[in-house]
Image (cartoon, helix red, strand yellow):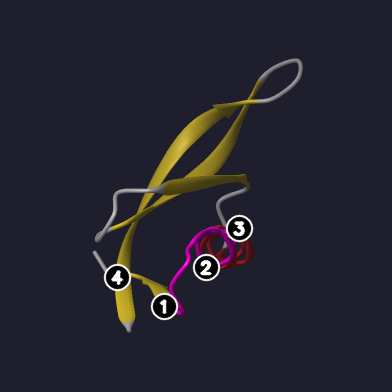
Amino acid sequence: MRVPCTVDYRELQGRNSSLDGVVVTCSRCEKSTESFGTGEASIKRCLALLREDCDEENYYYAEEE
């Protein structure tokens, strides 16, 4: 099943300071993952983490704003 996800750009807390990052949230279950960085690779990492965390075989994708 294809599941759309929202992407939010936020400051995330690192070890010593705040860093730019992304939070990706599943539209079905509201589970979210976060990664440092704001590029496409960071978003893809979050989507992959959602897939690993889910018990279903979903295809997660970032919704276009």
Asked if 29 appears above or below 58 in the picture, the reply is: above
x 28%, y 70%: residue: 64
Amino acid type assigned to the residue bearing label 2 in the image: Arg
Residues under numbered marks 1 and 2 in contact, where contact means CB atoms less than 8 Å apart: yes
Q: For the residues marked 1 and 2, what is the alpha-carbon distance in whole angstroms? A: 7 Å
Q: Residue furthest right?
A: 15
The residue that disc 4 covers is: 4
Looking at the rendered structure, which numbered label has been put on residue 51? Answer: 2
Q: Select label 1 or label 4 by which is in front.
A: 1
The residue that disc 3 covers is: 42
Coordinates of residue 43 in the picture (x, y in percent): 53, 61
**Reading the chain from its start, which is encountered first: label 3 or label 1?**
3
Coordinates of residue 44 in the picture (x, y in percent): 57, 67
Q: For the residues marked 4 and 3, what is the alpha-carbon distance in whole angstroms? A: 16 Å
Asked if 20 appears above or below 2 in the picture, the reply is: above
Asked if 29 appears above or below 52 in the picture, the reply is: above
Coordinates of residue 5 in the picture (x, y in percent): 33, 63
Question: Residue 40 versus residue 4: which sits nearer the camera?
Answer: 4
Q: Select label 4 or label 3 by which is in front.
A: 4
